[in-house]
Each structure stands twice: as structure tokens, then as C-alpha cells.
Amino acid sequence: MNKGVIVSLLSIGLAQGLKIPIHYAKKKEWRPELFFQTGGMPSSHSAGVSSLTTFIALKRGVPTVDFALSLVYGLIVMYDAQGIRRQTGELTLKVNSINELVEKIHHEDSTVEFEEKAPTKLKEMLGHKPEEVLGGAVLGLLIGYAGHLLTKNDSKMSDFTLHYK
């Protein structure tokens, strides 16, 4: 299998796994289901694309088309993770709050006090805060670099066998 894909997938898995202890450290609640959810610290989107981009830069070089494609793709993914997807999550909070207000109006005859709070009807953790994206990118850089170091001898060996067969 492609080593860049392996490095990237390992980075994504590690980022998803780190969400559980980081959440526990912040909120003092153990939530293993965070491994399978989007959003949170660190961004697995950022970790995956930045590890792949780092791996390609170190294996193939920065002036290659491979690196250029990975970098541009990675920047788009990270922008989307903290931009559009984050806005969608915030909009979801508002929609859930409005839905609760409408339900109160239809079920109560007295005056209704509206209190905005975190709803549970729609999934809200769709996107990332900028620091979560940055955290994922740093994690990805480290994993990409480690992946390069661990496979460094493999590429030299394959170059040797290709040239001397």
C-alpha cells in the first residue's frame, strides 16, 4: 500500500484518538464516542492533509507537482474545516434554539421566556475552531515527518534495486 496513505490515515486515527483525553482534560468527562465524531481538538482533517503534504515534501521534494497538489488540497480542506463547516455548526445552534421556542409557544398558554442554550436535536460539532485546525496541522507535520524518517531507508533500498537490477 502507498506509504503516504498509511501515514495520513495513521495521522487521522491518532487525531481522532487524542480527542478523547483532550476532552477529558478540559471537561472532566470520558466520552469514547468522540473517536467517531467530527469537530473537536485536534482536527483530524488538518492532521491527515498536513501529514500527507509533509510526507510528500520530504519524499519527493517541494518543487514537485505532487507537493503542489497536496498543499493546495490541504489548504482547502483546512479552510473548509474551520470556515464553512464551523459556520454550519453555529447555524445549527440557532436553528435548534428557534425550534425550542416554537415548541414552547405551541404548548404553553402563558408568556414564554426564551433562553438560548446548547440544543441536542441537530449535530453541532461539524467544524473546527482555528486553534483546532492549527493543532491538527501541527500534529500532521509531526506524523508526516516521523513517517518520512521511518520509511527513509525503504526508499533508498527501492532506488538501489531499481538502478542496479
Image: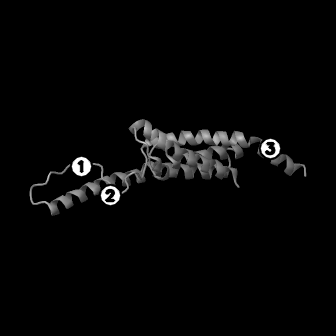
What label sits on residue 121 in the rendered view? 2
Amino acid type at circle 3 is Lys
Callout 1: 10 Å neighbours few (<14), some, many (20+)?
few
Whole-angstrom CA distance, mark 3 to mark 2, is: 54 Å
Residue at coordinates 18% horizontally, 51% vertically from top-left? 114
Residue wearing tag 3: 156
**At numbered mark 1, what does the secondary structure look like: helix, strand or loop?**
loop
Mark 3 to mark 1 CA distance (whole Å): 60 Å
**Which quadrant does the N terminus fall into?**
bottom right
Disc on res. 116: 1
Q: Nearer the viewer, mark 1 or mark 2?
A: 2
* Residues at circles 3 and 2 in contact by the CB criterion of under 8 Å: no
Q: Is 26 placed above or below 13 here?
A: above
Proximity of marks 1 and 2: CB atoms separated by less than 8 Å: no
Residue 17 position in % (x across, y down): 53, 45
Q: Would residue 120 be found to the left or right of residue 68 on screen?
A: left
Of circles 3 and 2, the one toward us is: 2
Tell me if mark 2 has few (under 14), some (14-19) or many (20+) residues whose alpha carbon lies within 10 angstroms of its own: few
Q: Earlier in the sequence, mark 3 or mark 1?
A: 1
- Near mark 3 (Cα within 10 A), the count class, few <14, some 14-19 or many ≥20, is few
The answer to the question of whether label 3 and label 1 lie on touching residues, with beta carbons closer than 8 A, is no
Q: Earlier in the sequence, mark 3 or mark 2?
A: 2
For badge 1, the amino acid type reads Glu
Q: Is residue 151 visible?
A: yes
Q: Nearer the viewer, residue 144 or 83?
A: 144
